[in-house]
Amino acid sequence: MQIIELYKGPIKSDTTNEYAKELLKLTDEQLAAVSERSKNEDLNKGLSLKKYYAPLLDANIAHIGAFSVEFQNLLLTIHSRLSLINEQIDQYNFYFKKTFDENMSNSNRKIITNNIDQCFSAISQQGRMTCDFIDRLLKL
């Protein structure tokens, strides 16, 4: 069963679930084409990225020793991945704000845009890995 089907939290969305299921059916080449088309359509729009936290884990970090070593490792890995994602989101937001500088040279704008793309790629990669760890945790 896909992790998206297991989710029962407050931001559950049937529309998002169906969209994700359709995307999972695509080949890598088709996904790249969808991504490129979306990128070209959204040239003058910014992607709003939100930070995520694990406050229950933060509050109970001292008590995870009661779980198996594997469970502890996965929890701490997920926790550290969230921190890495949030740091990348801070960096992304910094670069995104820079794009509104009207006095920026074209060469600097290209550098900023490249940095934004790199941040988004890193966030995406970390997000996928975090989801994989969550999936492994749920299967224990």
Image: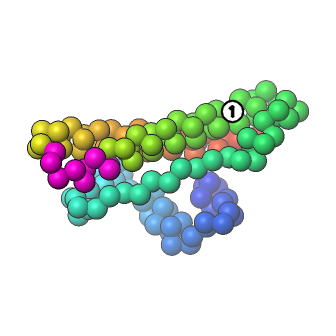
Q: Is residue 104 above or below residue 40?
A: above
Q: Is residue 36 visible?
A: no
Q: Is residue 13 above or below residue 120?
A: below
**Mark 1 burial class by Cα count in 10 Å: few <14, some 14-19, many 20+:** some
Question: Which residue is rendered at x = 63% and y = 47% of the image?
Answer: 53
Report the amino acid beneath label 1. Leu
Relative image position of residue 88 (x, y in whole percent): 45, 39
Give 4 or 67, whichever is nearer the viewer.
Answer: 67
Question: Which residue is rendered at x = 32% and y = 49% of the image?
Answer: 96
Q: Quadrant of residue 9?
A: bottom right
How has the structure been colored for display?
Answer: rainbow
**Main secondary structure along the magenta-highlighted residues:** loop
Quadrant containing the C terminus is top right
Q: Hey, which residue is sitting farthest top in the picture?
A: 69
Q: Quadrant of residue 82?
A: top right
Q: Which residues are magenta?
A: 96-104
Relative image position of residue 132 (x, y in whole percent): 58, 42
Q: Hey, which residue is sitting farthest front in the picture?
A: 103
Give 130 or 5, whichever is nearer the viewer.
Answer: 130
Left or right: where 123 falls relative to 36: right
Quadrant containing the N terminus is bottom right
What residue does disc 1 label? 76
Relative image position of residue 67 (x, y in whole percent): 84, 34
Question: Which residue is rendered at x = 65% and y = 37% of the image?
Answer: 79
- Residue 98 in the magenta stretch? The answer is yes
Give 2 or 106, whichever is nearer the viewer.
Answer: 106
